[in-house]
């Protein structure tokens, strides 16, 4: 996933973000590309007592390589003054542009806007990273205080009539300006963003819009903070170790360590992931414990207490609908998709409707297979959602003789990273990586690598933060600490965040194949950022439409299963022996296993998102659970044992991370991913030549051209849905 930053930034008069593994950016009227990374232990610790001699390092460019953040010097108390000063500086810069007496030109208006807000962007990039991956009470309070101010700051730019008149004058004369293609694209994107943000509204409607924007920003930040608390509080506390029978020793040890962290010695705490289904359910043999864990996840934000999110999200939905009406659209989804590849909610829904029947039919068949196993064991019950993963694993063992416990020893995290993720990037693009332990990080688990291009030149820094913490948002994502741009002479500094279970001291971090796929997915986003080669930061890297930004990441997942790449990293962590051929064959044979469930939970979440954002302006607040049930029934998802991947009350993507009316993008970009991989297969697969073409035509281009054309120029035709259906076993 590409995570959209919470603050609105200067140079990003274009915008976006990317997200979570194997499945999981927003292009809002004002945000910049996604960002989410953790904060150094030193950051939070140093905040308690800031010496009088302390100089705020965010106020000046970093002197570290690539202008990487000086996490050893930053303290929590630095962020608010840096953000406030950044807004002040940018508004002064914008006012100077808007009030200029000379005729508008591309350089004195559009490029000048690109150059504005450098301090704000620098501060926000780091702040957003920490609030996503290593937050604390101080940072959350700053986020809550600054979010409405930043929304107002964005409005002060996009709703500035004098400024817009200069942009509009240039747009009207665009054909006579003789701009190079990238500059012409920037002018068009800038103009469209202003219009999309309300620049053509009357002054009275602009005032109404500002109020709605401020309220939504406040509510969205509140939702994120409340959900983090709900997820932590919702963890399942287990008194008896026997209740965890069937879980791996490493997972039981992690549950014990989590209990100790909470001063619950002698107990076990199974922490929650952000999704509805929980990984621990697969191994748990005790059905009552499975049910408790599932319900802890399912109801985490619906207990009628301070951590209940339902009142917040119903108001967010109303605010968004009212904002869409002001901007001339029938609902929020119509406004949001106006500048996406799908263009309309109807097109997105039609696309999903082509997938839904096959997915539901496949899930129904899978349910029957699971029930058969339950009956054979004389279970005496009908399969429920908390049984699915547990018995699906038994079906997989029976059908494919494949046991997850057999697989994990071959997927040790560092080996997957170095000999899988990095190796594929080397084979395709010629990249090499060197770990840098001299660059400060925000948390001890974070690692930093310098990235070298095929000719040996240093081209980027890559941070990775893979282990779960209670103060980290759920899921997995990528973003930038520093965005590439030739305008500023900056090279990219990107990071990946995930939530894998941290092993006990001295033990290896063993991954499931889903976790492996997540690593490849997020690194696909990282490659999109690393290969950025644009003049302007607003068009750089992952600053693309939501239904394009997940394409590079999902495409990169394909290499996790490539025979050459797989053989290079799938080695036993103790012996170094390669995975036996028969086990490899079983994994390949089981590739389409449980895809009916996987696609159904994803499609139902995407349709749920779309329904929330097609609420008519002026509609009353919704009963969240009733709305959700009706939306799923309307879409044909009535299998109780196949719940949506995210329920409304903990759907962080759409209420806090910029994917509102955009979660369908994971499905849309699966189509692009599968279709693009067909091209690779047609042209010889994993080769440097093919990688260079993909880099030149997709990964390096950012948003420098209309995205449908960008794809057609690579593929030679529009994308087809057929490869996707075949890849997912739906055809």
Image: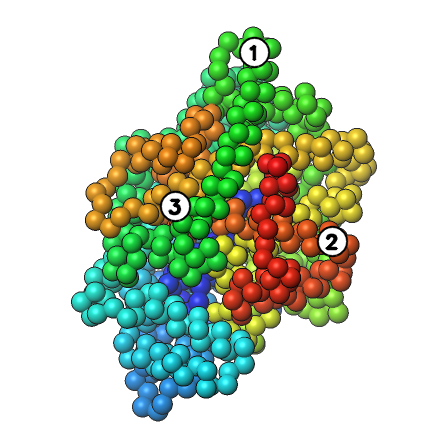
Q: Residues within 10 Å of mark 2 (few under 14, many from 20)?
A: few
Residue at the (61%, 25%) spot, across then down:
393
Expressed as whole percent of the image width and height from the top left, the position of residue 233 reads: 39, 34
Q: Is residue 479 above or below residue 622?
A: below
Q: CA distance from mark 1 to mark 3?
A: 38 Å
The colour scheme of the drawn protein is rainbow
| Secondary element at tag 2 | helix
Q: Which mark is residue 468?
A: none
Residue at the (71%, 54%) spot, across then down:
680
Q: Earlier in the sequence, mark 2 or mark 3?
A: 3
Residue denoted by label 2: 682
With 374 as the anchor, is 84 left or right in this view?
A: left
Q: CA distance from mark 1 to mark 2?
A: 45 Å
Q: Earlier in the sequence, mark 1 or mark 3?
A: 1
Expressed as whole percent of the image width and height from the top left, the position of residue 361 reads: 53, 29
Which of the two discs, 1 and 2, sits closer to the camera? Answer: 2
Q: Which mark is residue 610?
A: 3
Q: Is residue 294 visible?
A: no
With 476 as the anchor, is 609 left or right in this view?
A: left
Outermost residue, left side:
204
Q: Is residue 244 above or below residue 189?
A: above
Q: Residues within 10 Å of mark 1 (few under 14, many from 20)?
A: few
| Secondary element at tag 1 | helix
Residue at the (38%, 64%) spot, across then down:
30
């Amino acid at each position: 996933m590409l995570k959209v930053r919470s603050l609105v930034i200067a140079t990003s008069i274009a915008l976006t973000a990317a997200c979570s593994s194997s499945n999981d950016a927003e292009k809002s009227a004002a945000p910049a590309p996604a960002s989410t990374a953790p904060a150094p232990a030193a950051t939070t610790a140093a905040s308690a007592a800031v010496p009088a001699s302390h100089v705020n390092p965010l106020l000046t460019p970093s002197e570290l390589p690539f202008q990487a953040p000086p996490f050893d010097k930053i303290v929590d108390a630095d962020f608010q003054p840096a953000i406030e000063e950044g807004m002040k500086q940018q508004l002064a810069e914008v006012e100077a542009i808007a009030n200029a007496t000379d005729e508008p030109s591309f350089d004195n208006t559009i490029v000048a806007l690109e150059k504005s807000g450098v301090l704000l962007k620098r501060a926000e990039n780091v702040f957003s990273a920490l609030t996503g991956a290593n937050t604390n009470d101080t940072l959350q309070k700053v986020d809550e205080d600054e979010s409405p101010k930043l929304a107002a700051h964005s409005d002060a730019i996009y709703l500035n009539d004098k400024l817009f008149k200069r942009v509009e004058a240039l747009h009207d004369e665009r054909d006579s300006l003789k701009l190079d293609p990238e500059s012409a694209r920037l002018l068009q994107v800038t103009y469209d963003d202003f219009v999309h943000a309300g620049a053509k509204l009357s002054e009275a409607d602009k005032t109404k819009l500002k109020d709605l924007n401020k309220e939504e920003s406040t509510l969205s930040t509140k939702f994120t903070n409340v959900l983090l608390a709900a997820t932590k509080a919702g963890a399942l506390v287990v008194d008896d170790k026997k209740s965890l029978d069937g879980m791996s020793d490493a997972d039981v040890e992690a549950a014990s360590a989590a209990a100790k962290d909470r001063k619950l010695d002698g107990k076990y705490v199974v922490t929650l992931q952000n999704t509805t289904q929980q990984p621990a359910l697969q191994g748990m043999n005790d059905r009552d414990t499975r049910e408790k864990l599932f319900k802890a996840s399912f109801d985490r934000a619906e207990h009628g207490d301070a951590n209940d999110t339902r009142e917040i999200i119903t108001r967010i939905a109303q605010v968004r609908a009212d904002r869409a009406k002001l901007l001339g659209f029938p609902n929020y989804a119509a406004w949001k998709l106006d500048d996406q590849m799908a263009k309309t909610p109807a097109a997105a829904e039609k696309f999903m409707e082509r997938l839904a029947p096959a997915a539901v039919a496949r899930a129904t068949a899978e349910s029957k297979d699971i029930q058969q196993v339950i009956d054979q064991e004389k279970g005496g019950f009908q399969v429920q959602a908390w049984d699915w993963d547990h018995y699906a694993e038994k079906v997989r063992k029976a059908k494919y003789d494949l046991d997850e416990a057999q697989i994990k020893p071959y997927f040790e995290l560092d080996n997957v990273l170095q000999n899988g993720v990095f190796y594929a990037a080397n084979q395709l693009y010629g990249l090499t990586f060197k770990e840098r332990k001299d660059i400060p990080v925000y948390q001890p688990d974070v690692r930093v690598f310098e990235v070298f291009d095929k000719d040996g030149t240093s081209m980027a820094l890559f941070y990775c933060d893979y282990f779960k913490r209670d103060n980290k948002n759920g899921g997995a994502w990528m973003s930038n600490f520093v965005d590439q741009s030739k305008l500023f002479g900056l090279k990219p500094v990107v990071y990946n965040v995930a939530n894998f279970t941290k092993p006990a001291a001295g033990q290896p971090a063993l991954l499931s194949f889903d976790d492996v796929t997540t690593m490849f997915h997020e690194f696909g986003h990282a490659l999109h950022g690393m290969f950025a080669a644009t003049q302007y930061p607003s068009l750089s890297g992952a600053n693309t439409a939501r239904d394009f930004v997940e394409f590079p990441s999902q495409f990169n997942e394909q290499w996790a299963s490539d025979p050459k790449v797989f053989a290079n990293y799938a080695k036993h962590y103790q012996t170094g022996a390669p995975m036996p051929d028969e086990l490899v064959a079983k994994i390949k044979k089981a590739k389409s296993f449980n895809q009916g469930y996987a696609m159904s939970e994803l499609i139902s979440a995407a349709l749920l998102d779309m329904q929330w954002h097609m609420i008519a302006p002026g509609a009353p607040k919704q009963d969240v659970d009733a709305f959700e049930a009706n939306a799923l029934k309307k879409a044909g998802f009535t299998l109780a044992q196949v719940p949506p991947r995210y329920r409304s009350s903990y759907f962080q993507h759409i209420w806090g991370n910029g994917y509102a009316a955009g979660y369908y993008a994971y499905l849309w970009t699966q189509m692009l991913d599968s279709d693009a991989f067909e091209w690779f297969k047609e042209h010889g697969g994993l080769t440097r030549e093919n990688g260079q073409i993909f880099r030149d035509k997709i990964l390096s281009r950012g948003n420098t051209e209309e995205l449908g054309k960008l794809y057609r120029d690579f593929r030679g035709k529009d994308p087809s849905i057929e490869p996707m259906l075949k890849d997912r076993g739906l055809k």
